[in-house]
Image (spheres, grey):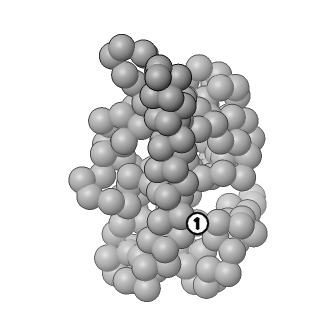
Amino acid sequence: MRTLEPFLAEHPFLKDLAPEYIKLLTGCASNVRFDAGQFIFREGDEANNFYIIRHGKVTIQLFAVERGAITIQTIEAGDILGWSWLISPYICRFDAQAVELTRAIALDGKCLRNKCELNHDLGYELLKRFSHIIVQRLEATRLQLMDLYGAHK
């Protein structure tokens, strides 16, 4: 039986992470599958995981009463989904929905937070990497809002 360790070690998001950290992450990892149309998480849910998308597409959405679901970004194989597991109060800030059959590696956020409490160097490494994801989501949100409000001028 193959472990997820080689995949995690080779993934660009985790590139150059110390081998002992990859082993710690592998202990928190599992394969998951989402059917087309299935919500992976909803805004307001407790944020317990992040995902490395292996196959498929996922939309990241905001819900507006006047407009319904607004797609902020569509991600696919190789992308990272979810950062709220790392930032207190650990609540999802967006909806995430599989557009098509999606396979991913789920990393348990509670497990990782415990490991980061015991190893602050690991926590700092993950925080540095996730800060880029957070900035990408904020930029995508900003661009989407510009499109929405620009269309009504």
**Residue 141 visible within the image:** yes
- For disc 1, the neighbor class at 10 Å (few under 14, some 14 to 19, many from 20) is many
Marks counted in the figure total: 1
Give the left or right position of residue 93, taking residue 105 as reference. left
Using the image, determine if residue 24 lies above or below residue 53: below
Q: Nearer the viewer, residue 118 or 82?
A: 82
Quadrant housing the N terminus? bottom right
Q: Circle 1 sits on which residue?
A: 26
Determine the secondary structure under disc 1.
helix
- Farthest residue in the left direction? 89
- Farthest residue in the front direction? 153
The residue depicted at 30 percent of the width and 52 percent of the height is 90
The residue depicted at 75 percent of the width and 69 percent of the height is 10
The image quadrant that residue 59 belongs to is: top right
Give the left or right position of residue 135, taking residue 63 as reference. right
Percent x, y of residue 16: 67, 81
Percent x, y of residue 73: 59, 38
Percent x, y of residue 96: 50, 34
